[in-house]
Amino acid sequence: MDVTEIRDLAVAWLVLSVAFANLYGDLFNPFMMGVSVLTVGIGFLLHELAHRVVARRFGLRAYFKAYYNYLGFAFLLSFAGFIFAAPGAVYTEGRRTARQQMLISVAGPVTNIVLGVLFLFFPGIVGDIGHRINIWLALFNMIPVGGLDGQSIYRYSKPVFAAVIITAAVLFLL
């Protein structure tokens, strides 16, 4: 991992954490900031790293690049009570099959689902926010439009797409 990628991941983690802490209503509360860093930040970071790890397992060059304009937009929207989070993406280079691309894409939402389940075992607000935000991240990323994971998953395997959506939707109701 080079310095630019580490910087982009760190800035995206920080801005998303601040935006969600603001969304939760208390940007200057150290506890809420900590909850946000833990729940949102780790969910975002592990989601992106999952894409990167799977892509590299297929022999591809893979790196995260932050979208600074979208990060600023997410922060500003948090004051309106909503966040559209598109902090950046893992870019991959090299030849891959459609199945490999689907596996790279599904790695992020599945990571958020696993984290969402794990957060069910945390007490109080940390567990509640960690569960909800990670399941929401999985659902959001499964929207089958360009730039989101759902597009390549839907294109390659409608059963995998449906399984991830249904799992996340059921877990969101918990």
Image: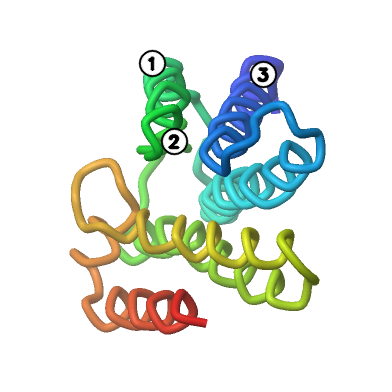
Q: Which residue is drawn at 75% across and 33% down?
A: 29
Disc number placed over residue 89 in the picture, else none = 2
Q: Residue at x 46, y 55 (%)?
A: 137
Q: Name the residue under label 1.
A: 69
In space, the residues marked 2 and 3 are separated at their CA atoms by 14 Å
N-terminal label among 1 and 2: 1
From the top left corner, tell me how far across and down residue 52 is, in percent.
56, 45
From the top left corner, tell me how far across and down residue 18 is, in percent.
62, 29
Disc 1 or disc 3, which is closer to the eye? 1
Disc 1 residue crowd, few under 14, some 14–19, many 20+, Cα 10 Å: few
N-terminal label among 1 and 3: 3
Q: Residue at x 47, y 24 (%)?
A: 75
N-terminal label among 2 and 3: 3
Compared with residue 90, is residue 79 higher up or lower down, i.e. above or below? above
In space, the residues marked 1 and 3 are separated at their CA atoms by 15 Å
Report the amino acid beneath label 2: Ala
Q: In which quarter of the image is residue 161?
A: bottom left
- Which residue is more in the foreground, 144 or 170? 170
Secondary element at image label 2: strand
Q: Quadrant of residue 99?
A: bottom left
Disc number placed over residue 7 in the picture, else none = 3
Secondary element at image label 3: helix
- Which residue is more in the foreground, 55 or 87? 87
